[in-house]
Image (spheres, rainbow, N blue to C red):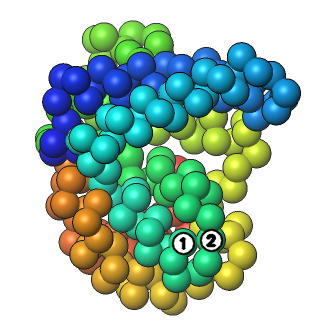
């Protein structure tokens, strides 16, 4: 987010570490009280971070997608997340952002990664985590999604309040391309 601060970064990175450590266990066993408790703390802390720093392209696109096709917001975010990260990772505006995330994920060599490399390994990590949890990987897998509507969705997403906080101000054509990649499974 363009409004990120050291305080929001601290909260976001803590939440990422906890989610990395506890989400798989919470999904595997819904009765794992410790995992669920830690996920509740992570959700709350992530919420504090994004309530102050704002969101971005993924949420803007998920609002349009879920609203138009009556899909759960979390599922829309899950599918779109790696594609939005990939889009942001190409920009110099993301300088250092993905390195922080790679460090929070405790990825090998994170502290020495160049920006684009950090973005790529973070995208791959998120995609792998999503697969391991059995989440849909493409928009094709979501019932009722019609790629002919991506232009209409992009019109909504570029006007969404979340888009204003994105590291890169995406235009309509760029948003259509991100939807297209998420449809094709371009990662």
What residue lies at 66% left-to-right and 29% top-to-bottom?
23
- Dots 1, 2 in contact, CB < 8 A: yes
Query: x%, y% of residue 128?
Result: 62, 36
Q: Is residue 142 left or right of residue 13?
A: right
For disc 2, the marked residue is 71
Q: Residues within 10 Å of mark 2 (few under 14, many from 20)?
A: some
Nearest the eye: 180 or 150? 150
Residue in view at x 63 percent, y 34 percent: 129
Give neighbour class at mark 1: few <14, some 14-19, many 20+ (Cα, 10 Å): some
Quarter of the figure that contains the N terminus = top left
Residue 167 percent location from the top left of the image? 20, 48
Q: Secondary structure at mark 2?
A: loop
Residue 40 % position (x, y): 59, 30
C-alpha distance separating marks 1 and 2: 4 Å
User: How many marks overall?
Assistant: 2
In the rendering, at what x and y percent does residue 143 appear?
72, 75
Image quadrant of residue 183? bottom right
Q: 2 and 185: which one is in front?
A: 2
Instruction: Place residue 72 in its image quadrant.
Output: bottom right
Residue pictured at 47% horizontal, 13% vertical: 106
**Which residue bears the numbered disc 1?**
66
User: Compared with residue 72, is residue 147 higher up or lower down, i.e. above or below?
Assistant: below
Q: Of marks 1 and 2, which one's residue comes earlier in the chain?
A: 1
| Placement of 84 over or under 96, stated as above or below | below
Res 115 label: none
Secondary structure category for the residue under label 1? helix
Which residue is located at x 34 percent, y 24 percent?
11
Q: Is residue 18 above or below residue 187?
A: above
Residue 173 location, quadrant: bottom left
Query: In terms of depth relative to the viewer, which is nearer, 103 or 23?
Result: 23
Quick check: 61 left or right of 138? left
């Amino acid at each position: 987010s363009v409004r990120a601060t050291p305080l929001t970064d601290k909260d976001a990175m803590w939440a990422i570490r906890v989610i990395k450590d506890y989400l798989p266990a919470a999904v595997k066993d819904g009765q794992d009280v410790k995992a669920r408790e830690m996920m509740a703390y992570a959700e709350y802390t992530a919420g504090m971070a994004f309530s102050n720093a704002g969101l971005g392209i993924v949420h803007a696109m998920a609002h349009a997608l879920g609203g138009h096709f009556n899909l759960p917001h979390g599922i829309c975010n899950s599918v779109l997340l790696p594609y939005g990260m990939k889009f942001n990772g190409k920009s110099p505006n993301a300088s250092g952002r993905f390195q922080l995330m790679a460090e929070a994920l405790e990825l090998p060599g994170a502290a020495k990664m160049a920006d684009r490399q950090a973005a790529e390994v973070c995208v791959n990590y998120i995609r792998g985590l999503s697969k391991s949890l059995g989440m849909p990987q493409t928009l094709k897998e979501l019932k009722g999604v019609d790629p002919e509507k991506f232009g209409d969705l992009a019109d909504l997403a570029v006007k969404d309040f979340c888009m204003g906080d994105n590291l890169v101000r995406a235009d309509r054509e760029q948003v259509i391309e991100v939807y297209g990649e998420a449809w094709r499974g371009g990662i």
